[in-house]
Structures are given as structure tokens and as C-alpha cells.
Image (spheres, grey):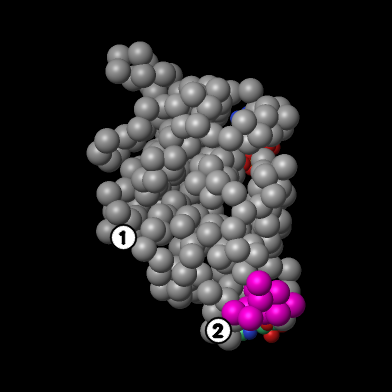
Amino acid sequence: TEQLNYVKNKKRIHTHGTDIPRLLETFDQLAHEYNVHPQIISNIKAAGYDLPTPIQMQAIPTMLHRRELMACAPTGSGKTAAFIIPILHHLKEPRNQGFRALVLAPTRELAKQTYREFQKLSEGRGFRIHYIEKASTAIKKFGPKSSQKFDILVSTPNRLVYMLKQECLRLHSVEWLVVDESDKLFEEGKTGFRDQLAEIYKACDGKSLRRAMFSATFAFDVEEWCKLNLDNVIQAYVGARNS
Ligand code: ADP
Ligand code: ADP
Ligand code: MG
């Protein structure tokens, strides 16, 4: 523990919560300690990621232990891979039971980037990853009459809510719901993200749902929401708390 505290202090990783999983100091630990598929580990290496970033050190093991998470770390610190790697591990292989992971992003550009990172890190695993480009075509593709041969969905909340209202998308099988840039999604105002999030949460009503929120800036209202709503949440902050 002393050694670990040293690393945590050095990397400026702050945590709150109970039974916080041990840091992931190297990606090889994914194989030895978590039995992550070798293809995923080689995809991480092929992406040029030699060592986990500080937020990855804490967020990856937290999610691998299926713990709900609120993570806060600066822009450019690798938050995307921090949630993609545990999701890919938990989904194991493609299945025909509808979306099992859902990632919400505040803008289309960010959703597309996240989609591309999913493709890169899941190369060779056969997962069907989707990004909703147009609500109208997505309705045909993902509706209840479709094959349900898809695994991962990345979307902005607006289109998703529209599709849920049309009853052309079911989210009962979602096991991981990730809200990226959650501070932005929680802002009130004309976009009404908070209401949209509530609709989406309502639709993700499977028994095994786990949630994780990621953001670059600390926001008190997000923290309050997480403490109130998430199950035994682990909070992980990298860098200054109010940066
Ligand atoms: P954030 O969401 O925190 O702003 P991103 O997930 O967009 O950050 O990552 C920023 C950059 O860092 C990306 O180009 C990504 O490919 C790269 N990156 C992610 N993880 C690592 C890592 N472990 N080592 C090196 N580069 C990484
Ligand atoms: P957008 O680019 O506006 O998100 P999409 O091409 O994804 O549109 O969706 C197709 C159509 O679905 C939109 O032109 C709009 O008519 C409708 N739509 C999407 N989101 C909503 C919403 N939240 N409320 C009402 N209609 C919506
Ligand atoms: Mg990001």
C-alpha cells in the first residue's frame, strides 16, 4: 500500500469511496490480473500506448471490477480509452441481443472520435459498433424488428431521445452506460441535456446496468448527482480538484 500511495501521490490521483481497486500501472496487468483478451492488449500497444495515463490507472481497474465511477481528469489525458478498454473486456464477444454498451457524448464530433477509438481498440474482435448519423435511417437499422446484431452505441443524447420516443430503440440490454464530458451534459439551458439524460437512464433498465461519468472539469452538481444516484460510487480525480 505504501508503494501504491507513492504512485498515487506522484501521479496526483485522488480517490473517494470504499474498496478502491488497485492501480493499473502497466497494460500487461490487464492480461495477468484481469484475463483481458490478448488481441485487445495488442491493439493498445499498436495504438502506441505504452503505459496507462493516471486516469487510466485508476478508472480501468475500477470499471473492470464493475464499480460505478465518476472520473475527472484534464483534456488530453486519455479518458476515452479509460472507458473503452473495460467495456471491451466485459462485452467479451459480439452477441445478437441489442446494444450492451452506450456512450453519450455532447457533440457529434466527439461522438465520432469516440467511435473511431472504439474501432481502433477493438480491431479483430468483431464487435458491431455504431454511431447514429441520422435518426431516420437508424430507426430502420436498430428498431425492434431488426436483427439486434449490434453491441456498442455512441451517440449524442438528442437523437437517442428522439428514437426512444418513437419506440424504435430498446436499451434493456445495456450493461455499461458512459456519459462523456458529463459536466457539459449536465448544463441546463436550451439543449436540455439533463432531461434527455433522465429519459435515457429510464430506458436503460436492465438489471446489470453500470454507469460511469467522465469529465475534464470538476462540477459540484455532477458530483452531487453521482453521490446521490450512483451505486457505491468511486470518485477518481487527477490533478487539482478545481482545475
Ligand atoms: P481526453 O478524453 O482525456 O481529453 P483522449 O481520450 O481524447 O483524452 O486522449 C488524448 C490523446 O491521448 C489521444 O490522442 C489518445 O490516442 C492518446 N492516448 C490515450 N491513452 C494513451 C496512453 N496510455 N498513452 C499514450 N497516449 C494515449
Ligand atoms: P439532427 O441532425 O437534427 O440530430 P437527425 O438526422 O439525427 O437530425 O434526425 C432526423 C430527424 O429526426 C431530424 O431532422 C428531426 O426531425 C428529428 N429529430 C431528431 N432529434 C429530435 C428531437 N429531439 N426532437 C424532435 N425531433 C427530432
Ligand atoms: Mg474526452
In the rendered structure, which amino acid carries the disc numbered 1? Asn
Left or right of 240: which side holds 190?
right
**Disc 2 secondary structure class:** loop
Instruction: Give the percent coordinates (x, y) of residue 163.
Output: 60, 79
Instruction: Give the percent coordinates (x, y) of residue 122.
Output: 67, 43
In the rendered structure, which amino acid carries the disc numbered 2? Glu
Vertical side of 27 occupied by 69: above or below: below
In this rendered view, identify the residue nearer to me: 149 or 70: 149
Q: Residues within 10 Å of mark 2 (few under 14, many from 20)?
A: few
Left or right of 149: which side holds 24?
left
Q: Residues within 10 Å of mark 1 (few under 14, many from 20)?
A: few
Q: Residue at x 48, y 65 (%)?
A: 173
Instruction: Give the percent coordinates (x, y) of residue 165.
Output: 54, 84
Residue lying at the far bottom of the rendered structure: 166
Q: In the image, which disc is placed on residue 229?
A: 1
Task: Tell me, yes or no, if residue 230 can be seen here.
Answer: yes
Q: Residue at x 39, y 40 (%)?
A: 65
Q: Residue at x 62, y 54 (%)?
A: 94
- Label tally: 2
Please check the rendered image and state whether residue 38 is part of the magenta-colored stretch, yes or no: no
Instruction: Give the percent coordinates (x, y) of residue 85.
Output: 56, 40
Magenta-highlighted residues: 137-147
Q: Residue at x 35, y 32 (%)?
A: 21
Q: In the image, which disc is placed on residue 167?
A: 2
User: Do the numbered discs 1 and 2 sit on residues whose CB atoms are within 8 Å?
Assistant: no
Which quadrant would residue 17 be assigned to in this image? top left
The CA span between labels 1 and 2 is: 26 Å
Q: Quarter of the image for the N terminus: give it.
A: top left
Left or right of 140: which side holds 193?
left
